[in-house]
Image: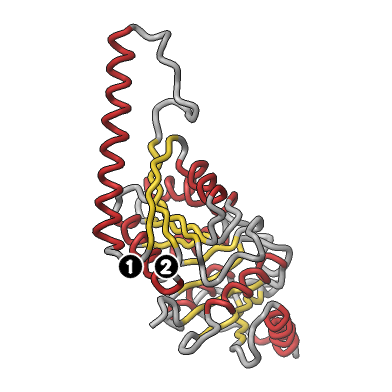
Amino acid sequence: MPTFTRVLCPVDLSETSGHAVSLAAALTASPPCQLTVQYVYVPMFMPVPMLPVPGDRVPPGEFDRVVEDVRTFATAAGCRSGVPVVVDVGRPDFEILKRAAEDTADVIVMGTHGAGGFSHLVLGSVTEKVLRQAPCPVLAVPPGARASSAVPFRQVVCAVDFSDWSVAALDLAASLAHETGATVTAVHAIEWPWREPPAPTLTDLPPEQAAALLEFRRYTSERAVARLRDVVRDVVAGRCETSTEIVHGKSHIELVRVASARQADLIVMGVHGRSAIDLAVFGSTTNQVVRHATCPVLIVRR
């Protein structure tokens, strides 16, 4: 059974959402996978959530025109004929989350910004709200993502910081890789109090301090190597080919660098997204990865 069988793909008819539709279509190319393409119509006067939309706020015949435009757009992006197209009315993030819950979607595939529809609300608005609140994983297609990203995925990079949610992300990455024969690279970033790489020179420090700092670096690195090896062994459990990499520096910078160096088809990250601290980390790490990645980014909330 495929990991994702019910896929929701919100679109805004932009080039970036076209890439998202292409990716979603590839993910659901074989039964029993199902794809639903969603467009959120934003009326001139925004309706109140949970209340019906007054009919006079939606121009006559507008729905039929929009549905036809979305269907044409989806077909041009590679969807097979007959893929369900739905048009919802209201606030984009609210309607996307509502549709995902009602359809019990396994994953939401969406571009992170574009030029029309709700796309003027860029990452940090609609997409960020969906990423934080979605009831399922979100596969974000950044503006800079290669249109030719492979499906099935062949090279997957997964961020592991040893939190429960990053372990859940590694588990999902291993499941996807098992289906497609992909290789998973588990990456752990060590963020020092100073900026690196490169590593700081220690010649200007007193000998005792330099020796203590070198020992601290050695201990921290060796402990990270051992923990990452154990987590990969226990979570992946031989389901796919894996490798590990310890990097030094800002997490989002190093993760994007490793993904680029390995020509990754997919980055997988786990987020918690509940407390104020979690949201701050989300903004500074996940947000930055999605903004700068050159491949799709799968966000797993726990």
Identify the element where label 2 is drawn: helix
Query: Residue 226 placed where, x, y %?
Result: 26, 43
Q: At label 1, which amino acid type do we have? A: Arg
Image quarter where the N terminus lies is bottom left
Question: Which of the marked residues, 1 or 2, is nearer the chain's N terminus?
Answer: 2
Q: Nearer the viewer, residue 218 or 113?
A: 218
Q: Which mark is residue 3?
A: none
Query: Residue 17 placed where, x, y %?
Result: 65, 69
Q: Would you identify the image quadrant in which residue 136 lies?
A: bottom left
At horizontal 28% and vertical 9% (from top left) the residue drawn is 208
At horizontal 50% and vertical 78% (from top left) the residue drawn is 7
Give the Cα distance between marks 1 and 2.
Answer: 8 Å
Q: Is residue 174 above or below residue 218?
A: below
Q: Is residue 165 left or right of residue 144?
A: left
User: How many numbered discs sit on the rendered protein?
Assistant: 2
Q: Nearer the viewer, residue 9 or 255?
A: 255
Q: Is residue 198 left or right of residue 135?
A: right
The 10 Å Cα crowd at callout 1, few under 14, some 14 to 19, many 20 or more, is some
Query: Residue 82 placed where, x, y %?
Result: 62, 93
Is the Cβ of the residue at disc 1 closer than 8 Å to that at disc 2?
yes
Q: At label 2, which amino acid type do we have? A: Ala
Q: Is residue 139 above or below residue 251?
A: below
Q: Nearer the viewer, residue 50 or 62?
A: 62
Image quarter where the C terminus lies is bottom left
At horizontal 49% and vertical 27% (from top left) the residue drawn is 198
The 10 Å Cα crowd at callout 2, few under 14, some 14 to 19, many 20 or more, is many
Q: Badge 1 is on which residue?
A: 239
Q: Badge 2 is on which residue?
A: 177
Kindly tell me whether residue 109 is visible in this rendering: yes
